[in-house]
Amino acid sequence: MVFRDDFHIHAAFYRQQSEGGKSGPKVIDQINAAKAAGTRYIGIVEHCNVNPTHPFHSLIELKAEFETLKTQYSGIFRGVEADLLDGGIDCCGNAGRSFLGLDYVIGSVHLSPGIMPRFADYLETEYSRIMLALKNNSNIDIVGHPFISGTRYQKAGVISKWDYSQIPSQWLWEIIRTAKESGKALEVNYRDFNDPFYRNFLADIRDAGVRFCIGSDAHDIEGHVRLESFALVLDELKFTTENQWLPGGASCL
Ligand SMILES: [Zn+2]
Ligand SMILES: [Zn+2]
């Protein structure tokens, strides 16, 4: 297995818990779980958005724990997963990034039928936000899980089946072309690698030399096992480390 780096691991302990709810893992729990799963570089994140369950102070508390661990572990990094909004701006911004002293920012679109009922509106909105973030947003390093919210429209019965064929192929090409120009990475973080249209998208990313990274999106200590299955798909598709995205201070060797 070539790819063993995971920059999308949530330390969910610090978010606002619902009354009686189970608290998620701390940074140390996620580092231990990632190491047990064989992960090399470990990137810890939490959400940065306007959802009350993700208050900004949770990112400050996460940072405080992370700082106590930095001297004990090498190869650990800290970022945020910031919501991408209209215009491609992100919820963290340059000011949030420098205040928190982040190593990187993932920009992700999170939409659902509850927020945007029409599937066509969702698709167009995600495309537009990704494109504008790639073109104009210097704050983000990685576009997180492109179009993963499509699965929610299938689950809610808005569409009968979600797969990458729902996305106009011209849009996928534009995303690849613009990502290549920007030097930003597209994240491989998806649950249906049997979707031939998604595999074609990955192959196009590979052939165009777009930067990429894998994210398990683990919200608990059990979620790390996903990384291996993602990495095996990239091996199968003959990805090499040449265009693998790594944060500053990490080396491919
Ligand atoms: Zn996300
Ligand atoms: Zn996430």
Image (spheres, rainbow, N blue to C red):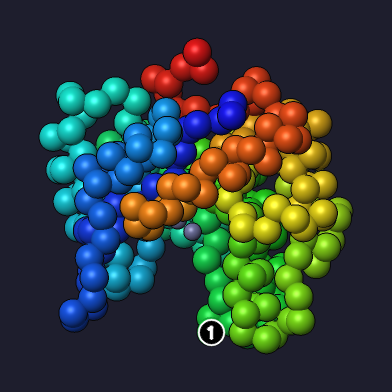
Read off the residue under disc 1.
114
Percent of width and height locating residue 31: 29, 39
Judge from the rendering whether residue 78 lies leftward or rightward of residue 125; answer left or right: left
In the displayed structure, would residue 68 be above or below residue 122?
above
Q: How many marks?
A: 1
Left or right of 129 in this view: 202: right
User: Residue at 62% across / 23% down in the picture?
Assistant: 241
In the rendered image of this protein, does residue 216 appear above or below residue 66?
Answer: below
Q: Quadrant of residue 134?
A: top right
Residue 44 in the image: state x and y as whole percent: 34, 43
Percent of width and height locating residue 194? 75, 55
What residue appears at the point 22 percent right and 58 percent down from the top-left corner?
14
Query: Where's residue 121, x and y in %?
Result: 70, 76
The local crowd at label 1, few if under 14, some if 14 to 19, many if 20 or more residues have their Cα within 10 Å, is: few
Q: Residue at x 68, y 86 (%)?
A: 157
Of residues 129 and 7, the one drawn nearer to the viewer in this rendering: 7
Q: Tell whether 29 sits left or right of 217.
A: left
Residue at the location (79% across, 39% down)? 203
Q: Quadrant of the N terminus?
A: top right
The answer, for residue 97, to whether it is visible in the render is: no
Q: In terms of depth relative to the viewer, which is nearer, 129 or 144? A: 144
- The reply to whether residue 121 is in sight is yes
Give residue 19's quadrant in the image: bottom left
